[in-house]
Amino acid sequence: MSAHLIEVKSGKDYTAHSALNNLLKNPEYNVLAATVISNERRVYQDGKVTYMPVYFVMFMDADTPQTDEEEYFF
């Protein structure tokens, strides 16, 4: 089973997440994607990490399966 990590950040340096990056790099953890929730006002993806504003949490679906490394569902 694969995992999708979520990290909530406050402050301006929301792209700094070394622990999250280490988990994404290690294949033993089977983490295919991650989401960083912050005060940033736009949604964008950088590699396996999707950045989104905190108010987008209402659109996330916990029951949506992660089927492919290239497809990220919210």
Image: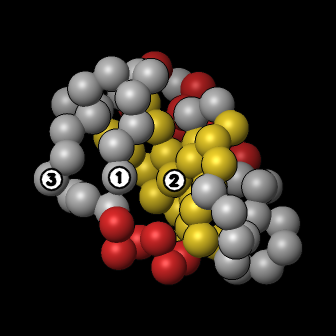
Could you tell me residue 59's position as x and y percent? 34, 66
Residue at numbered disc 2: 35
Q: Quadrant of residue 31?
A: top left
Gap between marks 2 and 3 measured at Cα: 16 Å
Residue farthest right in this picture:
12
Mark 2 packing: few (<14 Cα in 10 Å), some, or many (20+)? some
Contact between marks 2 and 3 (CB within 8 A): the answer is: no
Circle nearer the N terminus (2, 3): 2
Residue at numbered disc 3: 63
User: Of the numbered discs in the image, which one, if any, rests on residue 74?
Assistant: 1
- Mark 3 falls on what kind of element? loop
Picture residue at 33% right of the left edge, 21% below the top: 68
Picture residue at 56% right of the left edge, 34% below the top: 48
Q: Is residue 43 left or right of residue 31?
A: right
Task: Tell me the quarter of the image containing the N terminus.
Answer: top left
Q: Is residue 72 left or right of residue 36?
A: left
User: Of the numbered discs in the image, which one, if any, rests on residue 62?
Assistant: none
Picture residue at 22% right of the left edge, 58% below the top: 62
Gap between marks 1 and 3 measured at Cα: 10 Å
Mark 3 is on which residue type?
Asp
Q: Is residue 47 visible?
A: yes
Circle nearer the N terminus (1, 3): 3
